[in-house]
Image: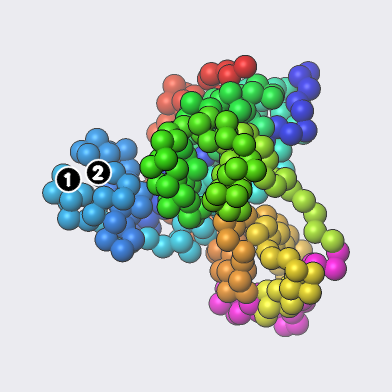
Amino acid sequence: MATVPDSRLLACWVPDWPVVAAAAAAQIPVQHPAAVFLANRVVACSARARSFGVARGMRRRDAQSRCPDLAVLAHDGNRDASLFEAVASTVETHAPGIEVVRPGIVAVPAAGAASYAGSEQALAELLVDHVSAAAGVECQVGVADGVFAAILAARSGMFVEPGQSPVFLAPRSLSELDQPGSGRAELVGTLNRLGLRTLGDLARLPERAVASRFGQEAVIAHRLARGVSVWPLSRRPPPELAVEKRFDPILDRVDATAFAAKALGSTLHVLLAERGLACAQLAISATTETGQTYTRTWRAAEPLTAQGISDRVRWQIEGCSPDSVCLMRQRLGTPCRWSTARRSRGVPRNVIG
């Protein structure tokens, strides 16, 4: 049985997730061109819409001129997060310890799950098959050292050999740093104007020079470009930074639970502030009256506020409902929609080494 280094991370990515979730809620057929808009600009679009020339960042008027039949869908982070729980739960069944990077992407340490499955490739095949069968959506899987490299590997359906993440990242466009929610668009634009085009171009600069010229955010981008993990995937907080509340009588409404979570979030913020810390990674565990526990780890691009914690509690509880899985099945049909050949596209098929 193959041995997998502890630094290896597996990322499971559902392409165009905001569109998939929005179309599921609106009951729009999978083959119909669709796009999600925020402030009259495209934030995500389906493959069918892209075939007409619709692209991320395009104005609504321009997108509709290219595709008059385009389904216009509103951006809703709550909807995206709650529906994604069906996918996250399926992945967690076979690879425990997952972390939601953002709705549409989960990451998990590959070592234990890959050893149990037999290899990283076998684990990838298992996840692609079971996500399709249980959640009714197509996903792609990638494996690499570090969260950033693993996400890009998943988008290409590849696995990167241990220690080769810098080689894998080097030729990729600098725009890859501008992941949704990262807020690096301005930084990428500045670096492009200075003649930097690829992650390798940025990685070759001395870190000291990057820090003195551009600041802390650029240092993080520089480390990502070099394939250095900015933070570990899972890190247990000290016991004193955990907050808990039990309810008697049991809460039976999602909004009441979210309200209680906001108060817990405020308490957590006080504990963090006393130590000069901020919350960028949050583990939420909820136990039902029957003793069933739902646990999920959330990562945030910006430090979470009490309201942000409350939102994630609501998303997690709403996503635990069987209705979310039923909604995805209504959107994409039964598991037999995806042939073996189609599902295999999500399995890492190339090696960088």
The picture places residue 197, in percent across and down from the top left corner, at 43, 33
Which disc is residue 67 wearing?
Answer: 1
Q: Quadrant of residue 256?
A: bottom right
Badge 2, how many Cα within 10 Å: few under 14, some, many 20+?
A: many
Is residue 313 in the magenta section? no
The picture places residue 192, in percent across and down from the top left corner, at 40, 40
Q: Residue at x 44, y 21 (%)?
A: 341
In the picture of the structure, the residue carrying the numbered disc 2 is: 54
Q: Earlier in the sequence, mark 1 or mark 2?
A: 2
Asked if the residue under mark 2 is in contact with the one under mark 1, i.e. CB atoms within 8 Å, the reply is: yes
Q: Residue at x 17, y 45 (%)?
A: 67
Looking at the rendered image, the disc whose residue lies closer to the viewer, 1 or 2, is: 2
Of 333 and 311, which appears nearest the observer? 311
Of 181 and 51, which appears nearest the observer? 181
Query: How many numbered marks appear?
Result: 2
Which disc is residue 3 wearing?
Answer: none
Say what secondary structure mark 1 lies in. Answer: loop
The amino acid beneath tag 2 is Val
| Bounds of the magenta segment | 239-262
Q: Residue at x 52, y 40 (%)?
A: 13
Is residue 241 in the magenta section? yes
